[in-house]
Image: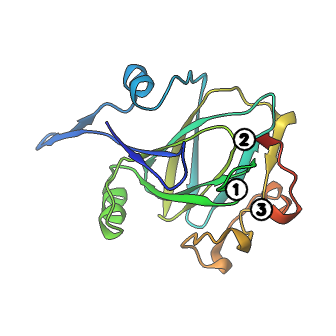
Amino acid sequence: MEIIETDIEGLYIIEPKVFGDARGYFFESWSQREFDEKIGVVRFVQDNESMSTYGVMRGLHFQRPPFTQSKLVRCVQGAVLDVAVDIRKGSATYGHHVACLLTGRDEMGVIIAREMGQVAGRQFFIPKGFAHGFAVLSETAVFQYKCDEFYHPEADGGISILDGSLGIDWKIPVGQVLLSEKDTKHPLLKDFDSPFEL
């Protein structure tokens, strides 16, 4: 796999090496050994999957200490715009974000990736201290992520996914955004007291 550094230290885009022929394709979607060597030692304990329709936006989520999570995310069908926002107090990039197009290797995912000049099948690693969210750009999308801590509902946290001060272009017209009730109640970054220290 190829590791691509981003504008924020600790956030990495991962491109798998894909082998394709007339029968289809094959790629290694996860290797503990290679991840340890190229990014660092992280032990994932839980895998999650969601299916969403066009316009759905989920986030920007995190888990509060002591149940913080690192995530390795990918889209296996369709396309999403995935975003991580630095919420570490004292960080030079506090409030900054990295956006990454993630697509499956299905027909729609490959088409959208090509249209946006990207490679299908990318993954995005998000360490502790970041809020995470995504927007669905295709008719439907299946999204998977690995976490290095179990889900603890009492530790749920978030900041508003529609906070204009973050400067995120979600590529979804505002009138077509679909949010859960929970995600409409998160504070703006300016009203947020982060539990994370750099």
> In percent of the image, x 70 and y 60: which residue is there?
95
Quadrant of residue 177 within the rendered picture: bottom right
The front one of 111 and 13 is 13
Q: Quadrant of the N terminus?
A: top left
52 lies left or right of 26: right
Query: Label 3, label 1: how many angstroms apart (C-alpha)?
Result: 15 Å
For the residue labelled by badge 1, is the local secondary structure a helix, a strand or a loop? loop
> In percent of the image, x 60 and y 79: which residue is there?
173
Percent position of residue 108, x then y: 35, 60
Q: Which residue is mark 3?
A: 160
For the residue labelled by badge 3, is the local secondary structure a helix, a strand or a loop? loop
Q: Specify few, some or many for label 3: CA neighbours under 10 Å numbering under 14, 14-19, or 20 or more.
A: many
Label 3 or label 2, whichever lies nearer to me, is: 2
> In percent of the image, x 56 and y 21: which residue is there?
43
Amino acid type assigned to the residue bearing label 3 in the image: Ser
**Chain-order first, disc 1 or disc 2:** 1
Q: Which residue is mark 2?
A: 198
- On screen, residue 46 above or below 73: above
- On screen, residue 28 above or below 182: above
Percent position of residue 198, x then y: 72, 41
Q: Specify few, some or many for label 2: CA neighbours under 10 Å numbering under 14, 14-19, or 20 or more.
A: few
Amino acid type assigned to the residue bearing label 1 in the image: Tyr
